[in-house]
Amino acid sequence: QVQLQESGPGLVKPSQTLSLTCTVSGDSIRSAGDYWSWIRQPAGKGLEWIGRTYIAGITDYNPSLKSRASISIDMSKNHFSLTLTSVTAADTAIYYCARIDSTGWSYYFDLWGQGILVTVSS
Amino acid sequence: NFMLTQPHSVSESPGKTVTISCTGNSGSIARNYVQWYQQRPGSAPTAVIYENDRRPSGVPDRFSGSIDSSSNSASLTISGLKTEDAADYYCQSFGDNDDDVVFGGGTKLSVL
């Protein structure tokens, strides 16, 4: 079955750029879904949507992160990625990648990666 | 900005029924569909309800969802509570422009 796995550095220095990759296994990313997303969760806190990408490359972002976040998709590598610039301690969180099921009237996150903890600290 | 408010915590005994609310701060909660996610400690969230009242494959029918326009709220009801239902539950819908995803703050369910 389709699985998602986040990867990337667990420690990023303040003011630098956070870069994460979500690898899709079990099927091609083109066949496995149309929309893919990133969501984060600071320790002990709630979920925050970062943004989503369509396989055609169209993206949408949380307005609060739009100026710093970028999501891209690489069909040849079967993965999609997140970059977040100018990070601060407030960006310390578990970052999840997720697939969006858009087959119904709306859409929801039907498959999640296990999450990766990213700490912003010098 | 559209926001969803949930109670911080609820508790109930095994075998009983519990309802978790999710209230919209403006507009109509019925304008967009509401989803619910369960997150057990140390694990990623999983969907238990989508499009207000539909269950993903594999989710038992003890889980049900509803919308109450009069109170501008969505509800997740879990009947026949089991200790394994103890988790954080998040509601999710969409913001003012219908594209931005909005999560509620989460409700910690204790079953004891």
Image: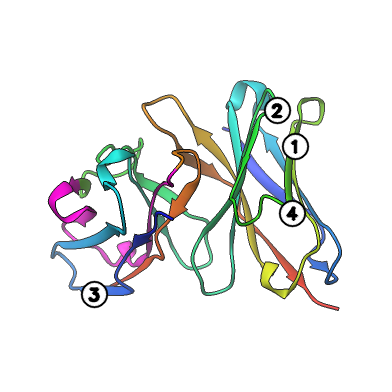
Q: Chain of mark 4?
A: A
> The magenta stretch spans which residues?
B67-96
Within 10 Å of disc 1 (Cα), the crowding (few <14, some 14-19, many 20+) is some
Amino acid type, label 3: Ser
Instruction: Single out the mark in the foreground, 4 or 3.
Output: 4
Numbered disc in front, either 1 or 4: 4
Distance of mark 3 from mark 1, alpha carbons? Answer: 42 Å
Q: Which callout, 4 or 2, points to the residue nearer the camera? A: 4
Element at badge 1? strand
| Residue denoted by label 3 | B11
Q: Residue at x 81, y 25 (%)?
A: A76
Task: Assess whether residue A27 is covered by the magenta stretch.
Answer: no
Asked whether the beta carbons under mark 2 and mark 3 sit within 8 Å of each other, the answer is no
- Quarter of the view holding residue B71: bottom left
Q: Residue flagged by tag 4: what amino acid is it?
A: Arg
- Host chain of mark 2: A
Q: Is residue B68 magenta?
A: yes
The residue indicated by pointer 4 is: A68
Residue at 44 percent across and 50 percent down: it is B46
Q: Which residue is mark 1?
A: A72
Q: Is residue A43 above or below residue A78?
A: below
The answer to the question of whether label 4 and label 3 lie on touching residues, with beta carbons closer than 8 A, is: no
Both marks 3 and 1 on one chain: no
Looking at the image, residue A26 sits to the left or right of residue B51; the answer is right
Mark toward the start of the polypeptide (4 vs 2): 2
The x and y percentages for residue B86 are: 33, 67
User: Along the line of sight, which residue is nearer the eye, A49 or B80?
Assistant: A49
Percent x, y of residue A72 = 75, 37
Q: Are marks 4 and 2 in contact (CB under 8 Å)?
A: no
Cβ atoms at labels 1 and 2 below 8 Å apart: yes
Dot 1 amino acid type: Ser
**Mark 3, chain letter?**
B
